[in-house]
Image: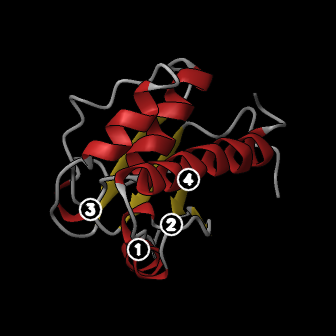
Amino acid sequence: MEDHKLTLKSILFICNINSIRSPMAEAILKLWFNKKIFIDSCGIRKGKIDHMAVEVMKEKGFDLSNHKTKILSNLEDNYFDLIIAFTKEAYDEAFDLTKTQACEIELLNIPDASQTTGNRQQRLESYRSVRELLIEKLQERFKKIL
């Protein structure tokens, strides 16, 4: 892995719907990098922000209530230095999009909290686990430039 301290100017998080993992990751990195790096997120299909994602992020001071989901095909700018995908399908779409660009693409395996069954509390715990795993994995990934 290269040290991107001087060269990393833009990061895109991509998932299937841009409703849980990618907006969470976007919010976390925007706080950490404080506008020093352009950070965005999108999905490969239309959707809307997941209300449980909004709720568990609010517990840590992140406001996702105004997040508008975006889809990859509608992004105004599709050039990024780094794309982090949360599903193999999103990874493949990102790879197809950037095959003629110098762009690093990574697959970060984070579970989909929306697939959790059970009562409300069990489901919220799953979303919290995803949030904490994202924080841990992103700290590890970006430790050299934070």
Instruction: Judge from the rendering whether residue 62 lies leftward or rightward of residue 43; answer left or right.
Output: right
Colour scheme employed for the rendering of this structure = secondary structure
How far apart are the alpha carbons under marks 2 and 1? 7 Å
Question: What residue do we see at 37% from left, 72% from top?
Answer: 97
Please, what is the three-letter code of the amino acid marked with disc 4? Val
The x and y percentages for residue 6 are 72, 32
- Quadrant into which the C terminus falls: top right
Mark 1 closeness class: few <14, some 14–19, many ≥20 residues within 10 Å: many
How far apart are the alpha carbons under marks 3 and 2? 14 Å
How far apart are the alpha carbons under marks 1 and 4? 18 Å
Q: Judging from the image, what secondary structure is the residue with disc 3 in?
A: helix
Q: Judging from the image, what secondary structure is the residue with disc 4 in?
A: helix
Residue that label 3 marks: 72
Q: Judging from the image, what secondary structure is the residue with disc 1 in?
A: helix
Residue that label 4 marks: 130
Question: What residue do we see at 41% from left, 26% from top?
Answer: 58
Mark 2 vs 4, N-terminal side: 2
Please determine whether, in this image, residue 115 is positioned above or below residue 134.
below
Please, what is the three-letter code of the amino acid marked with disc 1? Ala
2 and 1 marks in contact (CB < 8 Å): yes
